[in-house]
Amino acid sequence: MRTLAAGVLLVPRISALGAPRMSATAAPDSRDRVLAGILMTSAAYLLFSMQDAAIKLLVAGIAVWQIMLFRSLVILGACLAIGGPRLFADAGRSPIVRPMLLRSFLILAAWLCYYTAAAELQLAELITIYFAAPVIVTVLSIPLLGEKVPLIRWIAVITGFLGVYIACDPAELGLSTPILLVLAAALLWGLSIVLLRKTALQERTIIQLVLNNGFFLVVSSIAMASVWRTPTLPELALLVSVGALGGLAQFALFEGMKRAPVSVLAPFEYTSLVWAFVLGYAIWGDFPRPAVYTGAVLIVGAGLIIVAGERFGRRLR
């Protein structure tokens, strides 16, 4: 999942991977390390966009449950090859099992909504509308986490909401089922991020990968009895690529986070929009409606407002 969060912008994917918190007293990052972090993070978002494109190609003929099964198998197989059987025993004894289980249910629901909508929407429309998630996380942080939201963040929230509204273009698309599914996915993802922050999960990246994908493997295996379809050779290659791309993207994002501050990396999440436009045109010949471009600009602007506000605020403290 894309996941996607301003100020908040990078937090969903970073938190999901269990990135260590950076100490306020830590030594400044060298220019080379920061550059490496930026390159890794940018590569991660390219890989996530490629994964989404592969899934969009698959959902026309393969059930979402089956895609999830193969994705989980590929990632768990890679984890097994890296950590061996002991890794799975360590995951079973981890103190984060229960909160990860609840979070996995939320992510599962978001995943199903998102990729079901992918069959009907252009890739650029899909990702642009899904960037409502940062706005949702910001709003939910007030009642659920007791956070104080400064004026500049409210400006960003309103800007982002306008961007999503314009991208959805109710007069053109209407509140169709695919649009509602993407918005539901953004809401569910936002809830999963709030839960993640509230429980302050701290665990090795590979353990979290095992727990998340182990859950998805079990759930998708149960559903497979009624939706299984033997994939063709090209579909099988795409299914394997979904797992490989997703796993590599998560790894690149985590490693990038270790090398550069969040405030530096956060804006690069929005490169996903660029890749969505490029891949949508290259694979399907999609030309997004002008409203999608306008909405994307406003949503990117909302994220940059939050990042600028956070950095400016720190200088004043």
Image (spheres, rainbow, N blue to C red):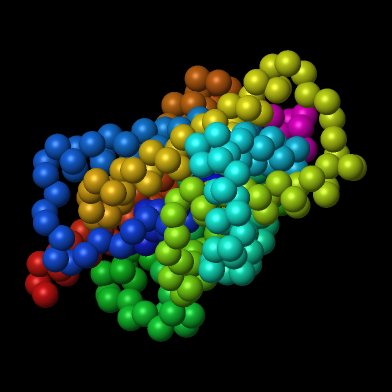
41, 282: nearer the viewer: 41
Vertical position of residue 24 compared to residue 55: above or below: below
**What's the residue at 61%, 59% (across, down)?**
92
303, 256: nearer the viewer: 256
Vertical position of residue 136 compared to residue 287: above or below: below
**What's the residue at 58%, 22% (across, down)?**
284
- Location of residue 100 (image quadrant): bottom right
Predominant SS along the magenta part: loop
- Quarter of the C terminus within the rendering: bottom left
Q: Position of residue 220 (x, y in %)?
A: 76, 47
**Left or right of 128 on screen, residue 44:** left
Q: Is residue 245 magenta?
A: no
Number of dots carrying numbers: 0
**Residue 297 seen in the figure:** no
Q: Position of residue 136 (x, y in %)?
A: 48, 66
Span highlighted in magenta in the image: 57-64
- Location of residue 61 (image quadrant): top right
Q: Is residue 62 magenta?
A: yes
Q: Residue furthest front?
A: 86
**Residue 102 seen in the figure:** yes
172, 295: nearer the viewer: 295
**What's the residue at 23%, 36% (across, down)?**
36
Q: Residue furthest right?
A: 226
100, 156: nearer the viewer: 100
Vertical position of residue 135 compared to residue 283: above or below: below
**What's the residue at 66%, 28% (across, down)?**
239
**Left or right of 56 on screen, residue 139:** left
Vertical position of residue 305 compared to residue 115: above or below: below
Q: Position of residue 45 (x, y in %)?
A: 41, 38
Q: Position of residue 175 (x, y in %)?
A: 65, 55
